[in-house]
């Protein structure tokens, strides 16, 4: 991921970097993990059984929609919260990720 | 019961409000005093909500009522894209801003070497994909009108008329606010603000209906959940394949949809807005989908069976007598439909006018092209306006043709799948430098074809795809059945179509990219896109000269407008720090100008227009070739110069040599004259002396007299011989000798020479010959040849210092020559004299000399005239000379002239 613009150009490439740089690199890890985590959590419903049209007595019929809704919306809310925290962290630790670009020059 | 009139009034009032908001926002922005909130991340996030169309507003409930929770996938895909903004969207936005792209077609065309073919392909795909979607919005508005019309029996209601007027109204709005400024890259503050307002309205409306359902019709969350579980959709009943496929599809469409690209990338004010939108937009999606299932469940429970679940959002409040809520809900749906149609029409019109109308117009202008006078801006603006009208017209006709029967969600998915065909080219273009234009075009074409065949045509029905093709496959080939390609049956038709179209699209894209080679400009653009974070402005070299600045100014004025263009040129002039009226067309300036123009008319057209004036960017293949050609010409020219210089120095060298030779000859002449006079003086002196004695001494004995007279006679003879020789030599040297060519054998010539030379000689010499080898026919001047032989034999007689002088004459044939060697048994010529013996007046031992030293010189002249040669053979026992003669060959006539 050399070309992701995460680091600064003059950033040292040593195992021991200042705290700020270290934080920024861990943020990158979160950034990469977040969508993967979200995708994984959203594929969990694929493993739920479809209801048996003729359920045996005493057998648990499939997943109830209410439970499914609860699960999905909780995951969804959690991802939104994580994304919010990530946004704040980016603002704190890695402002240059979302700055720059040619607009300063051309407009 | 709200009458249709009231509804129409509310509708018009709402539209008037939108117009007002858009107008005010545009005016404030034009005055440069746009409020902070207009540029806030909130507006950006809200404008993204045009993703939620009427399909979302009405269709999601219907979708939920039909297939349970599957409708959520439409929102989960975009959610994943947004929370992964750091990976994808950030790069897309950065690229879009740094290249000043105007649409997704423009972005792809810019990435793949500013290829207009690709842009046209993407535009066509987008128009075909979006048209059903637009007609879907029109349909939803009509349906919602119809709901109110049913409740108002007093009023006659014409469905078609309504659709027509809605379409016309939307077209006017889009034209008024979407084409206010030519620079498509500038923010459309009016439209964006109006869209944001509509986003709020639809969210509020849906939330209001949801709250009414959960807390009004039901008793809070717990009871609602229980009623959901008890309803028809109370079980988790989702097809796994569809769940994953539609999540993917919505994520892809979220990025590729032209209208999403418009608000997300083109209208993006600040990259930092992404940071907020990354959580705020998923939150918006969550809120808007939160009450969908409750509304669907309660609607199924309350409303009679057979009522259209797509309209539960309206019919549930209406059935409960909640007119106001129903009206708000209607406005929400109306907002969803209008905002989507307006932005989509804007985005599509930009694509159509920039990539289809402008190139054709430029082409029609012919060779003058970019430098013809007149305002291009009107052409572009009209093209865009007409495109909007045409696109909405297409939507209208599609609606009329299809009859508006299909379920909302199905049409939406078809549209998504079509648009998603751009994804491989887009992602490949952003992350893979090896992606090529041909690859992108091939992938796009394959995906598009499969999508049309497996999804669009079967869904359209209406005889577009004959039934037997659907059942038995194309040409009766069963593995070509549109809904079971390659014989894989049992898949859901959407999953099937998306699976095949996307996978083959991606595979073809990758394979063709790997096999083809990109053009230089493609490679430069590829590097700029993929490494956008490393260099935001790239090394694209335009080369220009001052003379073109004026043309550029003329062209820019036509596209940007006079004042804007002049301001831009002034800024550039100031940046260059130069004096004068126009900036120098430096590569940096040209690149900025191209971007500026590109924002108005698209990258490909801007590139072409600047190219027409400047004459091509320095990296086009043609230019590279031209440069190479120039280099070759330079090389050739320098080669010619070098040759000339070499020839001059050769000539100089020759001149120097001939000068030396002339000097030498002059010296030789002087030496010759002095030698000749010396040679003449000696006999003359003795003749004078003895003749004086004879004259003065009269009483001299007779014997004495006779002796002196003999001496005088001898000396006179010697003089005569000398003069004869000199005459002979000068005749030979001047080339005026006439040769008497005749044929004979060498034997005869030698016989004659030997007998002549030996006759009356006082120096006896033994001559050895081999008559057999001498039997060679020659064609030459035999008398002259004999003269040479005689001379050589006489020399041997004269100078051979052996006691018993012997001379061997050997005749041999060699490569095309006859060698006649005269070898005596004397001591030969000393080595230091061998070089000189053929020179005039050279005598090895003057004390024994009988002649004037001209004999061998004459021999050499004669032999050269006869095309032969004479040379001294060193390394023999005695003195030896070799005569070489040409074999039986005609001696060239020129020597005889």
Image (spheres, rainbow, N blue to C red):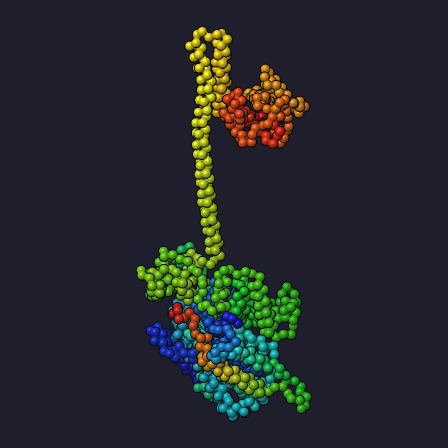
Q: Is residue B428 shown above or below B201?
A: above
Which of these two is toward me, B565 or B340? B565
Can I make out residue B141 in this image? no
Residue at 59% across / 67% down in the picture?
Answer: B507
User: Residue B1, located in which quarter of the rendered image?
Assistant: bottom left
Which of these two is toward me, B640 or B303? B640
Q: How many marks?
A: 0
Q: Is residue A57 shown above or below B841?
A: below
Residue at 62% across / 82% down in the picture?
Answer: A47
User: Residue B311: where, in percent of width, then height?
Assistant: 51, 81
User: Residue B493: where, in percent of width, then height?
Assistant: 60, 73
User: Residue B810: where, in percent of width, then height?
Assistant: 64, 26
Extreme residue toward the bottom, this view: B219
User: Residue B569, located in which quarter of the rendered image?
Assistant: bottom left
Can I make out residue B771 in this image? yes
Extreme residue toward the left, this view: B580
Which of these two is toward me, B30 or B327? B30
B19 lies left or right of B768:
left
Residue at 46% across / 25% down in the picture?
Answer: B672
Residue at 47% across / 51% down in the picture?
Answer: B631
User: Residue B487, located in which quarter of the rendered image?
Assistant: bottom right
Which of these two is toward me, B243 or B151? B243
User: Residue B392: where, in percent of width, then height?
Assistant: 46, 70
């Amino acid at each position: 991921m050399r070309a992701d613009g995460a680091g600064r150009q003059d950033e040292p490439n040593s195992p021991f970097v200042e705290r700020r740089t270290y934080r920024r690199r861990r943020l990158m890890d979160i950034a990469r993990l977040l969508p993967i985590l979200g995708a994984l959590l959203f594929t969990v419903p694929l493993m739920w059984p479809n209801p048996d049209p003729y359920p045996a007595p005493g057998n648990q019929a499939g997943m109830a929609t209410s439970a499914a809704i609860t699960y999905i919306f909780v995951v969804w809310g959690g991802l939104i919260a994580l994304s919010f925290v990530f946004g704040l962290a980016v603002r704190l630790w890695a402002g240059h990720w979302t700055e720059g670009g040619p607009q300063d020059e051309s407009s | 019961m709200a009458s249709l009139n009231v509804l129409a009034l509310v509708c018009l009032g709402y539209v008037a409000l939108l117009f007002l908001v858009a107008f005010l926002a545009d005016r404030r922005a034009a005055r440069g005093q746009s409020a902070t909130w207009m540029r806030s991340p909130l507006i950006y996030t809200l404008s993204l909500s045009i993703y939620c169309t009427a399909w979302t507003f009405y269709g999601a409930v219907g979708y939920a009522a039909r297939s349970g929770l599957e409708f959520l996938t439409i929102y989960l895909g975009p959610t994943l894209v947004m929370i992964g903004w750091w990976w994808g969207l950030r790069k897309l936005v950065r690229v879009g801003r740094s290249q000043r792209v105007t649409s997704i077609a423009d972005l792809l065309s810019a990435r793949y070497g500013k290829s207009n073919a690709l842009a046209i392909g993407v535009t066509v795909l987008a128009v075909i994909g979006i048209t059903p979607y637009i007609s879907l919005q029109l349909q939803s508005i009509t349906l919602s009108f119809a709901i109110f019309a049913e409740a108002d029996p007093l009023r006659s209601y014409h469905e078609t008329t309504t659709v027509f007027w809605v379409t016309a109204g939307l077209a006017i709005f889009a034209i008024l606010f979407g084409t206010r400024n030519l620079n498509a890259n500038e923010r459309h503050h009016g439209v964006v603000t109006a869209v944001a307002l509509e986003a709020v309205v639809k969210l509020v409306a849906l939330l209001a209906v949801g709250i009414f359902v959960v807390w009004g019709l039901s008793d809070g969350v717990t009871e609602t959940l229980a009623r959901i579980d008890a309803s028809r959709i109370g079980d988790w009943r989702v097809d796994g394949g569809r769940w994953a496929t539609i999540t993917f599809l919505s994520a892809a469409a979220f990025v590729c949809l032209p209208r999403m690209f418009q608000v997300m990338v083109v209208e993006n004010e600040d990259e930092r807005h992404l940071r907020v939108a990354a959580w705020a937009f998923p939150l918006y999606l969550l809120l808007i989908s939160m009450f969908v299932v409750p509304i669907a469940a309660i609607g199924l429970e309350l409303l009679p069976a057979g009522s259209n679940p797509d309209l539960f959002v309206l019919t549930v409040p209406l059935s409960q007598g909640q007119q106001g809520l129903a009206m708000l809900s209607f406005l929400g749906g109306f907002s969803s439909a209008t905002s989507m149609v307006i932005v989509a029409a804007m985005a599509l019109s930009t694509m159509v006018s920039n990539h289809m109308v402008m190139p054709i117009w430029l082409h029609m202008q012919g060779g003058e092209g970019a430098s013809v006078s007149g305002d291009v801006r009107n052409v572009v603006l009209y093209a865009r306006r007409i495109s909007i009208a045409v696109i909405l017209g297409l939507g209208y006709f599609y609606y009329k043709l299809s009859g508006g029967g299909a379920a909302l969600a199905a049409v939406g998915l078809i549209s998504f799948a079509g648009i998603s065909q751009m994804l491989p080219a887009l992602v490949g273009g952003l992350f893979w430098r090896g992606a090529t234009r041909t690859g992108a075009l091939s992938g796009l074409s394959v995906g598009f074809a499969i999508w049309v065949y497996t999804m669009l045509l079967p869904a359209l029905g209406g005889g577009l795809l004959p039934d037997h093709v659907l059942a038995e496959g194309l040409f009766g080939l069963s593995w070509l059945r549109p809904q079971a390609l390659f014989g894989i049956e049992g898949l859901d038709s959407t999953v099937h179509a998306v699976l095949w179209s996307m996978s083959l699209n991606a595979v073809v894209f990758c394979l063709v990219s790997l096999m083809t080679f990109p053009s230089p400009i493609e490679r430069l653009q590829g590097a700029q896109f993929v490494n956008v974070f490393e260099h935001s402005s790239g090394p694209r070299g335009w080369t220009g000269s001052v003379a073109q600045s004026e043309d550029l100014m003329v062209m820019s004025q036509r596209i940007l407008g006079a004042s804007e263009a002049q301001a831009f040129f002034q800024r550039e002039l100031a940046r260059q720090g130069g004096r004068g009226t126009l900036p120098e067309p430096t590569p940096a300036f040209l690149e900025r100008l191209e971007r500026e123009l590109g924002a108005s008319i698209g990258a490909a057209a801007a590139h072409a227009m600047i190219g027409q004036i400047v004459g091509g960017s320095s990296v086009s293949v043609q230019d590279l070739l031209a440069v190479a050609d120039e280099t070759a010409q330079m090389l050739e020219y320098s080669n010619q110069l070098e040759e000339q210089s070499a020839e001059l120095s050769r000539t100089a060298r020759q001149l120097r040599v001939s000068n030396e030779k002339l000097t030498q000859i002059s010296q030789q002449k002087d030496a010759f004259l002095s030698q000749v006079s010396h040679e003449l003086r000696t006999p003359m002196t003795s003749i004078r002396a003895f003749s004086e004695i004879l004259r003065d001494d009269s009483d001299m004995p007779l014997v004495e007299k006779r002796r002196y007279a003999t001496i005088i006679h001898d000396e006179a003879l010697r003089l005569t011989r000398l003069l004869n020789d000199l005459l002979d030599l000068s005749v030979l040297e001047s080339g005026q000798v006439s040769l008497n060519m005749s044929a004979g054998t060498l034997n005869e010539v030698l016989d004659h020479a030997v007998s002549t030379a030996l006759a009356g000689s006082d120096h006896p010499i033994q001559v050895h010959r081999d008559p057999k080898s001498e039997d060679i026919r020659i064609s030459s001047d035999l008398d002259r040849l004999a003269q040479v032989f005689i001379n050589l034999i006489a020399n041997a007689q004269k100078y051979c210092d052996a006691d018993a002088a012997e001379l061997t004459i050997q005749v041999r044939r060699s490569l095309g020559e006859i060698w006649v060697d005269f070898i005596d048994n004397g001591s030969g010529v000393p080595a230091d004299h061998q070089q000189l013996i053929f020179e005039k007046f050279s005598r090895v031992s003057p004390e024994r000399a009988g002649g004037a030293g001209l004999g061998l010189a004459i021999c050499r002249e004669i032999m050269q005239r006869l095309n032969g040669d004479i040379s001294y053979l060193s390394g023999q026992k005695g003195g030896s000379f070799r005569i070489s003669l040409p074999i039986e060959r005609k001696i060239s006539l020129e020597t005889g002239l």
